[in-house]
Amino acid sequence: MLFVYQSRKNLCEIMLTSSRQLGLIVRLITFVPESIMSGRDRRGGFGIGRRMVIGAAAAMTAAVALGVGSLPVSTALAQDARGGGTLSIILQPEPVTLTPSTNMAQPTQVVAGNIFDGLVSYDFDLKPKPALAERWEVAPDGLTITFHLRSGVKWHDGKPFSAADVKWSLENIWKTIHPRNKSLFENVTQVDTPDDATVILRLSKPSLPILSVLNGVGAPILPKHLYEGTDILNNPYNNKPVGTGPFVFKEWKRGEYVELTRNPDYWEAGKPYLDRLLFRIIPDAAARAAAIEKGEIQYAPYNPVPFRDAERLSKLPSLKVDTRGYEWLSPLLYLDFNVENPYLKDVRVRRAIAHAIDRAALAKIVWFGYAKPAISPVPSSLVTFHNTKLPQYPFDVKKAEALLDEAGFKRDANGVRFTLTHDFLPYGDDYRRTGEFLKQALKRVGIEVTIRSQDSAAFIKRVYVDRDFDFAISYNNAFPDPQIGVVRAFWSGWLGTGTPWTNGSGYRNARADALIQEAGVEGDPAKRVAEFNEFQDIVLGDVPSLPLLELNFFSVYSANLQGIVEQGDQVYSSLKNARFTGTPKAN
């Protein structure tokens, strides 16, 4: 029995009755409850609520079972000729590399999403829709997934794209060096390619999250003919990438811009509409805001300006501020404690710091309400997996003081217990201001904090390679399933690899590791929920990483742009549908 998803229906029934492991009926109804709207309407701001996936475990099971046929073409844009012109885009900070196979940082993926297509992309409700895979089927036992690839697709160098590229990428990238996917694809024991247009994954056990991570940056497909037999991590094509996407790499002028041009051989007829994408690197926040306001920049994703500027820009008729397009991410701001630090290795100190931070005030004062306090490493947007019955650390200065006293760190004559150095993610003013907020919070309980700043490459090296830090602020995207984005911050298997955005704290817990492994191969959604509930209880009790805020990102773009936000993974997807109304921009 195979399963087919009818894309034009708002209600779908997925019957998984042929397998004892997946023997259930999932009824997935797409809706947006009022209770989980973002809350920005209350503040008279942008008035756009984030859509959630209801019943995440069921949705993951549904996703694995979906075989997608033809989808309706994108609205009125598909009916018009392409507009041409250049779209200038903010890119901040400058990326370390342009290929997402080894780097999950947002600047890399914002560019790469225009160069690389994935097997699928995701709509606003996080349902997969066709990209390089026209359709797919999942066997009733969940142990075989078959992808039928689009024919006639070419790499940007003119070579044909085929099943061999997918097989090579899975075996050499997804299962080995990709920072998120090693555990997701470890159940894939064999990849068959009976012809150039068919890829068959054979699994030892079902892997429910797989179809939630197959877009161009989640599971990047690289050209086998350019990478096979090379040092993948140091291949020169990492910084002059060759993909199958709607835009072709032209130039990266360090410190200034990355330039992409229209792919004339793109598989989707008539797309993209624009002639050129120019990603401009503008480190100064005030300069970014000015460039946006003047129209020199027409698209700026990922909180490109401080929130106070966003509020002002949102009132200009020439601009739009939009929180859509981030639904696939579920970003979480957190503190990584270096558990090898002589002070922070004591769990009482880590818990004291947690109690010393007023997260509600942090959300309001620093993040201007574009965030809410986090109570778990699994964000509340992952409804089914989010455990609300966890150890909590409410703002309580007296409790923090008592824990520090109990740990033996008394105040000296100057009222200081000890000093820590704080490193903040160099992604803009919001993270620096968060560091200043933490410094003041910890000073109240006798901990002096020195703030250290550096560029993105130095931050990654310090935290994930050299481990030469005390505590650092960063964020992770949880994605639609904890196995994709959450567990990498806690699984000890990443230790010693130097892989960015994985287990920065240096945490080891045998039971947490076992639960991560079990949830990764469990085919029963209810059992996965139970495993992730226990996992959350353990890691929040040990608090090697402290969840601070669930973030809401925003983009700013020109009001005369259409097709700029079309799907739930838009910020990491391509701008193939974007075009100007009126005269095309040229810079």
Image: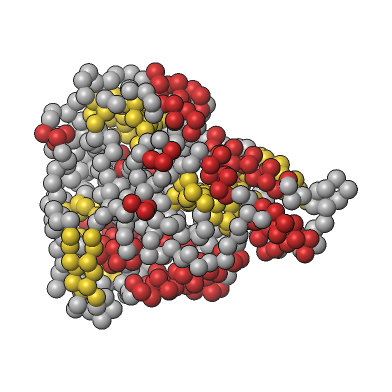
In terms of depth relative to the viewer, which is nearer, 570 or 468? Answer: 570
Q: Residue at x 22, y 66 (%)?
A: 27
Q: Is residue 226 something that shows in the picture?
A: no
Above-or-below relation of 425 to 149? above
Q: Residue 529: give x, y in percent of width and height.
A: 40, 70
Write the residue at 70% across / 48% down: 442
- How far from the left and from the top, in percent, is residue 443? 73, 45
Q: Quadrant of the N terminus?
A: bottom left
| Residue 52 vertical position relative to residue 110 in the rendered view, above or below | below
Could you tell me which residue is drawn at 43 percent across and 74 percent down? Answer: 530
Report the front residue among 185 and 43. Answer: 43
| Residue that appears at 17% across and 62% down | 12
Farthest right residue in view: 413
Q: Out of 302 and 101, give the one closest to the viewer.
A: 302
Tell me the quarter of the picture where residue 56 sits.
Answer: bottom left
- Residue 331 in the image, given as x and y percentages of width and height: 44, 49
How many numbered discs sit on the rendered protein? Answer: 0
Q: How is the image coloured?
A: secondary structure
Question: In screen coordinates, is 525 left or right of 391?
Answer: left
Could you tell me which quadrant the C terminus lies in?
top left
**Residue 309 % position (x, y):** 47, 28
- Residue 333 in the figure: left or right of residue 99: right
